[in-house]
Amino acid sequence: MALLALAAWAFPASAQFDQEDIDPDAQMLLVADTLVYDQDQNTVTAVGGVQIEYDGNRLVAQRVTYHRDTSRVVASGHVEIVERDGNRILADQIDVTDDFSEGFVQALRVETVEDTYFAAENAERTAGRLTTFNRAVYTACEPCEEKPNRPPLWQIKARKVIWDGQAKTVRFENARFEMFGLPLAWLPVFEIADPTVKRKSGLLMPSIKGGSELGFGLTVPYYLALSPTYDLTVAVTGYTKQGFLGEAEWRQQFNNGSYNLRIAGIEQQNPQEWAANEVDSHETTRGMIASRGEFDINPRWKVGWDVMAQTDKNFARTYAIEGYSGAVQTSQAYLTGLNDRNYFDLRGYHFRVQESVLDSSSAARNDKQPWVLPVLDYTYTPDAAVAGGELDIDVNAQSLYREEGMYGGGDKLQGLEGESGRLTAEAEWRRSFVTSAGLVITPILHARGDAIYSNLSAGAVTQVEAFAPGAADIRSSYYRSMATAGLEARWPVLFSMASSSHVLEPMAQIFARPDEPYHGRVGIPNEDAQSLVFDATTLFERDKFSGYDRIEGGTRANLGIRYSGNFAGGWTAHGIFGQSYHLAGENSFASSDLVNVGAYSGLESDVSDFVGLFGIVSPGGLAVSAAGRFDEKTFELRRGEVRAGGAVGPVSTNVHYAYIQSQPEYGFGNDRQEVGAQASLRFNENWRGFASATYDIESETLVRNTFGFAYDDECFTYLMSFSQQRTAGGETKQSFGFNISLRTLGDFGSSSGALFGDR
């Protein structure tokens, strides 16, 4: 019948419909109170509660008439169209040709599945692809349910809006931007992508950058959607003091991975804005090139990289290049494999410190950073039990080169100038037995071997000999091994009460092994075991050094008790407390190495400090924990940390306190004590305020603080913040930032640069 023309109905008002989208084999369902054939007028009319469904689209109206002679379809009376993709079109009257290439709509409203909304006095469709909205309104804010007539948070009113269904663009002419119903800006013409389009070439929202030496800057980016699999973003930032910064980022996606390439550069106009002793004042032509990528070789293996090179060591940090402005930039390439419990990781690293001091300064750190090529980690765990227990095999290798040594005065040598390498292989076997009384006994066997290569510069050799007169042992190669036999016993005991249950688990370990090879001799580089923190989390570790370059020797016992509890209402608690004892042989933590890693660790004496941890978690998410290390004789606090956080109603907070007693031989001559806090207060559904601060108790300095407020809802986000950071020299850096995000239109705001400058 003639009404089959309506079966093609999709989105005539918004120009989303294409004839080829129609399934020619689809069945049409028509429901109406009356169907009238008028031979004189040559029309077919459905009257009263008309519903037409075809190919996933639905039309509802009071009256639908098809004019045979003009091939036009007219629907009137509370017309509503629901497309198969969920878009809704509402109108008083729709008058279109039966192929929907041309038509007219009166009193139109459009609600898309992306929650964007159009309204217009009328709309006209021409050429089968262009829909013109007259006196139109566009917004991405949902109407207020309580007050539907109230203006949305933001909207764009335009004399004319042209929606191009083929180019997938929306063009606004003679438009004004309104917030809360108040006009804020007039825009003679601008264009955005169709809300259904995820990628579209065009200008992106600009942003503000700046700093005291850069001046204020405006960034204007342009996005090029060149293909479904690759695109390009270019941006120009004009700085009032330094000229124009150009940036470009290429991104490409493949079936098995993706990569990007980023470049940036500037010809500085006024390098003298920086102090004479800073890198930035000595550079004119500056730039960088960087790339990141990762590809799956197969379901088990992947390869990737993250590399950056720049003309000087501080360009990316000075100009806040996205993703590359950190104080330390790590370039790396890697190959990883994962299969069940077996793991392989091969990497190469290069560390670059982005700093303002000149290389000629003694404070410069960049040339002291090493090349690490390669680093290998391999773990193999057989699926089948070995002698009834679990066997783990680990291999680690690293090769390192440092151009300039890192020497911390007479206290420690953090990095030696020259080359070094190490290959480590180890295997551990353990099996647990449970007695009838519930005692869990676990024998542990461990074996390890190391081959170490060293080729230090003459200057490094001199430094080592001066650091340990008479105890320096500098060789080109070292070989060492260690065998450990251990036994662990745990006896978990459950106590149940009417409203709670508790598990107390006394635990004891003993590890018997020979002395650490080269004990008392200094010469083996220590690169990955420089940090030693003895606390409750490391109490029951077989080897308490943090890396492979140091190896624990001597016989040691670890004793402690673990606790966990569950209480009525969902409260839980956990804790651990214990001590470690050196029983025989030489204590590795009491012996010197290049960084004095064992000094003031709490393990350097035969009886260690006490360590403990206790925490409580509420059903509402409030968590409090405290951990500490206490002198084995006086119980004086040597190291402590307290944390608390959670949300109560509209307030969420996190507070932490940390204390570390002085460690002179480890390079810290004074106590360190710091307290920090973060808080957020939500005033209502949309508004919130936030603040954070870190305070150094020893120096009585507010190291950093930030505060601000934000508004967010389904279509609009606004954030404003103010930050201060103070250095040990008394310098204060202040920064102000803001960001406005309008959904479907874009973001506008500032970078985190210091807009106020330093003082």
Image (spheres, rainbow, N blue to C red):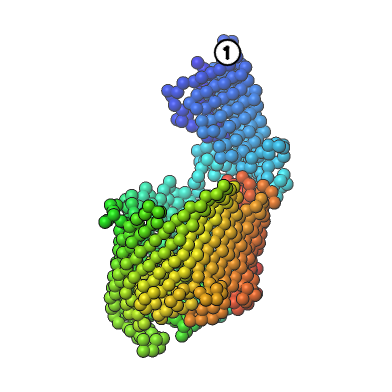
Q: Can residue 336 be seen? A: no
**Image coordinates for residue 193, horizontal then vertical, percent:** 54, 44
What amino acid does circle 1 point to? Leu
> Looking at this view, is 234 or 52 the one in front?
52
Image quarter in which the C terminus is found: bottom right
Circle 1 SS class:
strand
Residue drawn 64% across and 40% down?
142
Residue 616 lies in what quarter of the image? bottom right
Circle 1 sits on which residue? Answer: 35
Residue drawn 46% across and 58% down?
505
Residue drawn 33% across and 59% down?
430
Rendered position, 489 above or below 271? above
Rendered position, 271 above or below 73? below
**Image coordinates for residue 539, horizontal then vertical, percent:** 45, 66
**Image coordinates for residue 41, horizontal then vertical, percent:** 59, 13
Q: Which residue is most to the left?
A: 387
Rendered position, 469 above or below 639? below
**Image coordinates for residue 26, horizontal then vertical, percent:** 45, 23
